[in-house]
Image (tube, grey):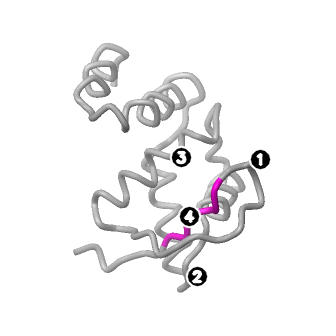
Amino acid sequence: MTLQTTDQAIASLPLFAKPAAACTAKAELVAGFDTDAARAAILEALTKSGRAMTGEELVDHCQRLGLVPHDARAFGSVFAGLAKQNKIVSVGFAARRKGHGTAGARLWRATDGR
């Protein structure tokens, strides 16, 4: 995707989704972040574990696989995209291991994809 088409795609998003999408687009362009591989890794981890996992656990899993964006916040739109496709669902919150003064970590579970 070129910078121009990326900018056009981001411009068409709702206001709340633009920062995460822009961060992911930059990660793809600048750091060579593979969004599709990150989606696949998250789904595989959730399916193999058979349990809900925090976003932090899933990001750590991706990073261990070498899926490291320039900014970990690039994973926000990865999770949002999987949720929008009904491949994962948020099932609650857990205590955070990272972040200072932030809300609880979201718990994700794989769905049957329907």
Q: Is residue 63 left or right of residue 97?
A: left
CA distance for labels 1 and 4: 15 Å
Question: Which quarter of the figure is the C terminus placed in?
Answer: bottom left
The residues bearing labels 2 and 3 have C-alpha atoms spaced at a distance of: 20 Å
Residue tagged 4: 106
**Of the residues under marks 1 and 4, which one precedes in the sequence?**
1
Q: CA distance from mark 1 to mark 2?
A: 28 Å
Which quadrant of the figure has residue 79? bottom left
Amino acid at pointer 3 = Phe
Extent of the magenta region: 103-108
| Structural distance between the alpha carbons of marks 3 and 1 | 18 Å
Q: Which residue is depicted at the point 50% across and 70% down?
A: 108
Q: Position of residue 1 (x, y in %)?
A: 33, 25
Residue that mark 3 sits on: 75
Magenta stretch containing residue 106, yes or no? yes
Quick one: label 3 or label 4, which is nearer the N terminus? Answer: 3
Crowding near the residue tagged with mark 2, few <14, some 14–19, many ≥20 C-alpha atoms within 10 Å = few
Residue at the disc numbered 2: 49
For marks 3 and 1, the one nearer the N-term is 3
Q: Which amino acid type is marked by label 4?
A: Arg
Can you give x and y, in whole percent of width and height, for residue 59 in the image?
Answer: 63, 55
Task: Return the mark for residue 100.
Answer: 1
Q: Which marked residue is nearer to the observer: mark 1 or mark 2?
A: 1
Residue contact at pointers 3 and 4, CB within 8 angstroms: no
Residue 48 image-quadrant placement: bottom right
